Amino acid sequence: MSSSILRDTPETELWQLVRQGSVPAYEALYERHWETLYETAYWRLYDKDAAKDIVQEVFIYCWQKREQIQITESVVGYFRTAVRFKVLNHLKSEQARDKYRQLAGRELPEITHSTEEMMAGADLEASYRRELQRLPEKMRQLFIDSRDHGLSVREIAQKHGLSEQTVKNQLSAALKKLRDGLGNFFFE
């Protein structure tokens, strides 16, 4: 498919081509959206190198997981949401916290959520729920008790009549399975 045809192809159709392994379609999406995604990251970090790295990580992740990622509404919204997750993960690091504290005196940009970003967030949430349903029933219940209900390992063990070590093992296994299905955006 020529680049001129791809230039006019709707992004959801491009994503379907990407899912089938089309490098030109992926390059077309990259060319359309990398600058917007870079700005999204930069205006939250004020760090050009980190913003570039984050955008690259998102594109690499999306290419690697293209067959599992199902985008039904907005490709750029999905990408923006992924960039925001990566930015949040970056801000968790100690180095980023120090830089963020230095910038605290500046007026920070207001974060807004567009409709397409909310739809992308919904897509990510749906992917998470789908992967959660793929877990074995007992493992899923332990994970939900931990993450959704906020129970400690000890409380979960008592509730289900298991040893604490068994609960820890099950939670670790659940995280591994979810990471494999979703990548590391949610669990870093």
Image: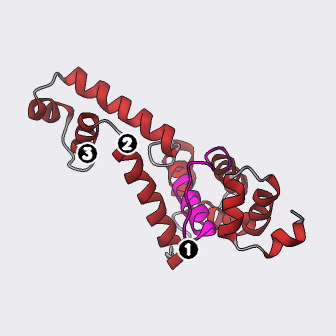
Give the crowd class for mark 3: few <14, some 14-19, many >=20 residues within 10 Å: some
For the record, the magenta segment spans: 63-86
Which dot marks residue 134? 2
Front-most of 36 and 99? 36
Which of 159 and 131 lies nearest the eye of the viewer? 131
Task: Report, in whole angstroms, how far the alpha carbon at label 1 lies from the one at label 2.
Answer: 39 Å
- Amino acid type at circle 2 is Arg
Give me the disc on residue 109. 1
Image location of residue 130, percent across then percent down = 40, 51
Q: Disc 3 or 2, which lies upstream in sequence?
A: 2
Residue type at mark 3?
Ile
The answer to whether residue 113 of the structure is visible from this angle is yes
**Image quarter of residue 82:** bottom right
The answer to whether 112 is drawn above or below residue 12 in the figure is below
Q: Which mark is residue 100?
A: none
Q: Which residue is drawn at 18% across and 42% down?
A: 151
Circle 2 Cα neighbour tier, 10 Å, few/some/many (<14 / 14–19 / ≥20): few
Corner quadrant of residue 135: top left
